[in-house]
Image (tube, grey):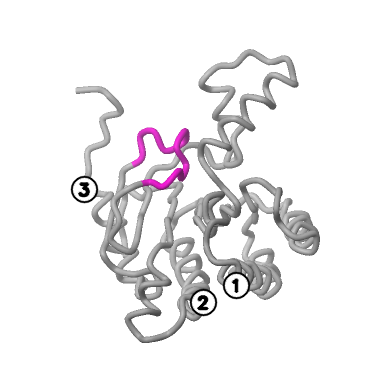
Amino acid sequence: MEISNLPKHVGIIMDGNGRWAKLRNKNRSYGHQVGSKNVDTIVSHAFKSGVKALTLYAFSSENWARPVEEVDKLMKLIEQYLKKFIKKVVKNGVRLSIIGSRENLSENLVKLISECEEMSKANTDRYLNIALNYGGRGEIVRAVNKLILENKEITEKAILESLDTADCGEVDLIIRTGGEKRLSNFLLYQGAYSELYFTDVLWPDFKKEEFDKAIEEFSKRNRRFGKV
């Protein structure tokens, strides 16, 4: 796919795993398992397409309200993903960051996150952010409190540079799979002028061709940023 007007930073709300599983008479955790395998496919394809930064919504701060068994299995899947793909991420020059709050995460997961981030921190070619226990409102509060503690002036630019995605800048395109048409507390500040792309395709079925459709749609849009 050759498109001159590529988004530099893409955010993806990976929705629809549970419904995908239900359509196949499987439990929701099976859907998350299949969906996790699709992450590597889309991440690799996005970077090969020329995208410089990806932010994936894996688990929101509101998702703790889901059944305990489902949450536990999802956390184990995330651990498995990090252990399996960190070496590949480092080898390919990708910097991995887990954004969001570390509160309520297990001690083992927090340790693993720190190890993965340390292993890839020297990479600056491409950025992969996984939003875990993340909420856009909470991120803004953390950023403002950080500025207050550092006795810095609170400006729009200062807040942007204090967010979890500071190294990646603003988000050009936000994709949501699964048919819902809302942001669900995802990248609220840095996504102020993002182009939005909603698709009915459930995340496990969101393959390379579907990602290309979103990029092609983005390339056709006229981004005026408030101008005429």
Determine the secondary structure under disc 2: helix
What is the quadrant of residue 161 in the picture? Answer: top right
Q: Is residue 51 magenta?
A: no
Instruction: Tell me if residue 125 can be seen.
Output: yes
Provide residue 142's location: percent of width, then percent of height.
Answer: 64, 32
Query: Residue visible at 59% across and 35% down?
Result: 163
**Is there a contact, CB below 8 Å, between mark 2 and mark 1?**
yes
The disc placed on residue 29 is 2
What is the quadrant of residue 86 in the picture? Answer: bottom right
**Which callout, 2 or 1, points at the residue further toward the start of the chain?**
2
* Residue picked out by circle 3: 220
Mark 1, Cα crowd under 10 Å, few <14 / some 14-19 / many 20+, is: few
Determine the secondary structure under disc 3: helix
Total label count? 3
Provide residue 64's location: percent of width, then percent of height.
Answer: 57, 56
Report the amino acid beneath label 3. Lys
